[in-house]
Amino acid sequence: MGSSVKSLKGRQHELSDAFFQLNVLQAPTQHGDQFPAFAGRLQEHGLYPLKPTGTTILQVNMGKMCNQTCKHCHVDAGPDRKEIMTREIMHQCLEALQQSPNITTVDLTGGAPEMNPDFRWFVEELSKLGRQVIVRCNLTIILANKKYHDLPAFFKQHGVHVVSSLPYFQASRTDAQRGDGVFEKSIKALQMLNEVGYGLEGSDLVLDLVYNPSGAFLPSAQASLEAEFKRRLRSGYSIEFHNLFCITNLPVSRFLDYLVQSGNYDTYMEKLVNAFNPVAAAGVMCRNTISVGWDGYLYDCDFNQMLELQVEQSSPRHIRDFNAAVLDRRSIVLNQHCYGCTAGAGSSCGGETVK
Amino acid sequence: MEKTYYNPADLSKFGNISELQPEMGRKFFDYYGEVFKEGALTAREKALIALAVSHAVQCPYCIDAYSTDCLEKGADENQMMEAVHVAAAIKGGAALVHGVQMMNKIKELTM
Ligand code: SF4
Ligand code: SF4
């Protein structure tokens, strides 16, 4: 898939509509069977309604604008998406954080968060507040334009924890998922991060990689894949990194489109449902995270955000009304896509949830 | 009655073989599970061996299962195809090496 590919929204694709996506997720299979309701599975294990364990992470989606158009993107991000967070909403995020000392980590995502013109200002303000900042950097953005070439130095200056997607240690599968030439640029960007000290053994400039399967299959055990990634990236490109997070692709947005288009939807969902693991379910990331959309609305996670499933009605629903204590009493909004977080060893922004 | 001998949906029913003989079925699956655990060989290496063997025994269920398993375990396409060639080389070699037996027989029977 080249960079000329448009988002689902840009193509006016029916799956760009969250309501339509939810209908697909709830429809019976081709054989007329119904997948068991996710909520029911949680109930069997005494986890329903699902409650937060205490919010410690604020995930901020800074906008849908991105220099890439990855096939599996659950955000439906791309160069043609213009929705970005304003400085006003960022101020509201900072105010919310000031009142919430238990939130120790702010996880910046997008799109490519770095494309937001207020990105650097926001990172500076967050580090003044003494919060750990994570940036989900797609790597190629560092090379996309001269003005981004110094991002590694900027990240270093603020002790930012960099988390970057690299679907595979070879060009074939990486480019198939993320676009032609992405692998080569990603390698270069990783080398630039290594150069300033990121990812090196013993370095506190943390560089973690994220692995998403490039197709309709699940990720395998994180530890063995991490060892293989380390071996291949070190021998092939002299690249070092800290941890590999294995993330299951959730049937949302462009990955959902891929599943439907390729005829893999039913078997993939069946796989997720059969791999349901109650231990993974107990550790899903929505229990300690709140996700803020580019327009300030609050969600249980980034996936719920893309499906327009806001936090339940009795909770504050916008960052300007943020109240951690009230939010921590809410019930988390669930749907069939949640099976993706609870399959096998579990999946979250930090990889497996079963430790 | 199915019109074909192989139905992909039957793969997920593999476990049902225990219904008619629970004890042996259980022993087989325990053993199977043990074999595929990470050991002196990594789980990925074992998946590649299984993929090669599934081609040698020409089991479509196993080819399905271990193609997926190899992808999940991070094997790349080259490794997977090389594994199939290893199976092909052994199968081809095994047929050809019997050519020696044929040549022996020819010698025995001809002037
Ligand atoms: S997956 Fe990440 S890098 Fe790819 S299009 Fe989506 S936001 Fe951009
Ligand atoms: S998809 Fe979101 S709400 Fe559902 S289990 Fe995963 S993190 Fe929680």
Image (cartoon, rainbow, N blue to C red):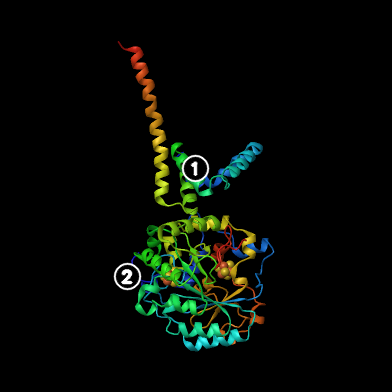
The residue under label 1 is which amino acid type? Ala
Q: Nearer the viewer, residue B105 or A274?
A: B105
The location of residue A192, given as percent across then percent down, is 41, 70
Whether residue B102 is visible to the viewer of this picture, yes or no, is yes
Compared to residue A281, the image places residue A84 above or below, namely below
Residue A140 as seen in the image, left or right of residue A219: left
Q: Which mark is residue A211?
A: none
Residue A16 as seen in the image, left or right of residue B46: left
The location of residue B41, given as percent across then percent down, is 54, 45
Mark 2 neighbour density, 10 Å: few (under 14) some (14–19) many (20 or more): few
> Could you tell me which secondary element the residue under label 2 belongs to?
loop
The location of residue A251, given as percent across then percent down, is 49, 64
Compared to residue A323, the image places residue A267 above or below, namely above
Say which chain tag 1 marks.
B
Q: Which residue occupies 48% across, 59% down?
A: A230
Q: Which mark is residue A4?
A: 2
Say which chain tag 2 marks.
A
Q: Which residue occupies 56% across, 58% down?
A: A273
The residue under label 2 is which amino acid type? Ser
In this view, the residue farthest toward the top is: B111
- Residue that label 1 marks: B50
Name which quarter of the figure residue A98 lies in: bottom right
Q: Which residue occupies 49% across, 79% down?
A: A157
